[in-house]
Image (cartoon, grey):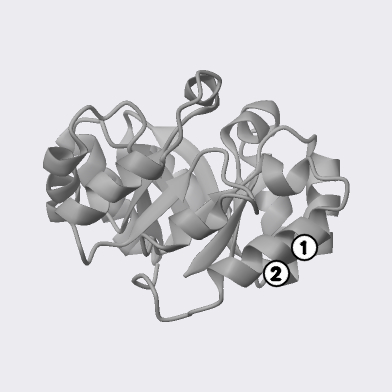
Amino acid sequence: MKLQLALDTLPLGAAIALCRDVVDLVDIVEIGTPLMMREGIHAVRAFRDAFPEAKILADTKIMDGGHLESTLMFAAGADYVTVLGVADPATLAACVDAARAAGGRVVADLLCVDDLAARGPELVALGVDVLAVHTGTDQQASGRTPLGDLRTLRAALPDADLAVAGGISAATIAAYVAERPAIVICGSAICDAPDPREQAILIGRAVHADPDRGAPA
């Protein structure tokens, strides 16, 4: 099981500085969508230069132009790109083709997918590597969490590589780990903490307690 650090709201320099403090505790460094919107593809290159050994995910949330946009991110140094699970099958397949050519991986973000149990197998059949259950920040404001969606998708796909994101913290991590995701994604719980490294240690301890739980991603 892997811990992914989502860097969303910090400016580029501050995000790199925070990452330096915790990068040894996480498995994947996510350049979040807000950070990419602020800095563009330069953010991917900057993180690749700063962390040459890290696994980097570009949270591109691709909806069209799958091959071009994926290829741009892989060429800049990303190991993973994200595509929206509601995208057209041609877009999803194009992302997968680009990933195979670049030696990268594709994560389908399932935000706003209405029927997870039906859509999940379709995405796996298209060659997507990881399915990410995601409760967005606007949804979280109404009290929603991704735990129920994670359980639904795990029941439909017992052996798939799943990721989960959406307000997960040290206080709630145990419930998510119990569902055997391949990747647990944490952002504000670490980035906004008074001591980000302390929180990364606490969350990472739960995620890494049993390295055989969940499929490798």
Q: Is residue 121 visible?
A: yes
Q: Secondary structure at mark 2?
A: helix
Q: Give the image location of residue 55, x and y in percent.
A: 57, 65
Q: Residue at x 22, y 27 (%)?
A: 114
> Residue 207 shows which numbered tag?
none
| Image-quadrant location for residue 160 | bottom left
Q: Residue at x 48, y 80 (%)?
A: 211
Q: Give the image location of residue 84, x and y in percent.
A: 34, 34
Q: Is residue 85 above or below residue 158?
A: above
Q: Amino acid at mark 2?
A: Leu
Q: Is residue 18 above or below residue 143?
A: below
**Left or right, 214 with reference to 144:** left
Q: Amino acid at mark 1?
A: Val
Q: Give the image location of residue 152, x and y in percent.
A: 24, 45
For label 2, the residue is 25
Q: Secondary structure at mark 1?
A: helix
**Left or right, 116 with reference to 24:** left
Crowd around label 1: few <14 · some 14–19 · many ≥20 (10 Å): some
Q: Residue at x 56, y 50 (%)?
A: 172
Labels 2 & 1 near each other (Cβ < 8 A): yes
For label 1, the residue is 22
Crowd around label 2: few <14 · some 14–19 · many ≥20 (10 Å): some
Q: Nearer the viewer, residue 98 or 21?
A: 21
> How many numbered marks, from 0 up?
2
| Mark 2 to mark 1 CA distance (whole Å) | 5 Å
**Left or right, 157 with reference to 134:** left
Q: Quadrant of the C terminus?
A: bottom left
Q: Give the image location of residue 13, x and y in percent.
A: 85, 43
**Left or right, 117 with reference to 136:** left
Q: Is residue 47 above or below residue 72?
A: below
